[in-house]
Image (cartoon, rainbow, N blue to C red):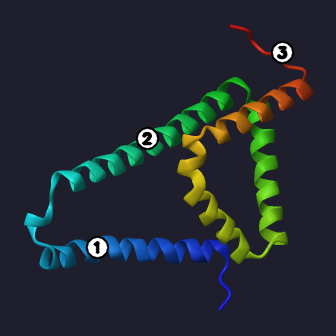
Amino acid sequence: MDPSVITALSLLGLVITIADFVLPTISKSVVSDDTWNSEKEKKFSIFVNRIAYYGVQIWNFQVQLEEWKREKPNMYASTVICSLLLTAWIGNAVNNLILVYFLVLFVALLPGLLHRRILQVLFASVVVKVGNMLGIKRKTK
């Protein structure tokens, strides 16, 4: 069986949905309430805060795209079309299994990359280079 990435993601979503439905019932019968302590509460709080942080980041990205669509529709459309064409070409040229491997690897390394601010530095340098190519001058504070 050689499913495409879309099929693999759909199957992963199906497994997660079934696990979300079944695991609370199983965990109630297996785990007693006296095993919860302050250390587990702290870990749970950190985990929930990270989920909320990434949710806010995704929301901010969506708001930024909507603003960009309103203010610079031609640039927005050309960028989205080019990125989708590039993604389609990569999906066609590279084996799906290695794409999923790279995606999982990136997601696993993402917290460390964000903590060390590596992605922010790389993204800022890319933005500066693209701005220089397009002739956009940097704003000084």
Amino acid tagged 2: Tyr
Say the numbered circle drawn on residue 5: none
Task: Kindly check if marks 2 and 3 are in contact, taking CB atoms under 8 A apart as contact.
Answer: no
Label 3, label 1: how far apart the Cα atoms are: 53 Å
**Residue visible at 63% across and 58% down?**
106
Camera-near label (2 vs 1) is 2
The residue carrying pointer 2 sits among few (fewer than 14), some (14 to 19) or many (20 or more) residues within 10 Å by Cα, namely few
Looking at the rendering, which quadrant does residue 77 occupy? top right
Q: Could you say where residue 117 lies in the image, as x and y percent from the top left? A: 61, 37
List x then y, in percent, for residue 13. Answer: 47, 71
Q: Residue furthest front?
A: 39
The one nearer the camera, 11 or 77, is 11
Marks 2/1: CA distance? 25 Å
Asked if 72 appears above or below 81 in the picture, the reply is above
Tag 3 or tag 2, which sits nearer the N-term? 2
Q: Do labels 2 and 1 touch, CB within 8 Å?
A: no
Label 3: state its secondary structure.
loop
Residue tagged by mark 1? 21
Q: Amino acid at mark 3?
A: Lys
Disc number placed over residue 53 in the picture, else none:
2
Q: Position of residue 113 (x, y in %)?
A: 60, 46
Name the residue beneath numbered marker 3.
137
Left or right: residue 25 versus residue 124 is left
Amino acid at pointer 1: Phe
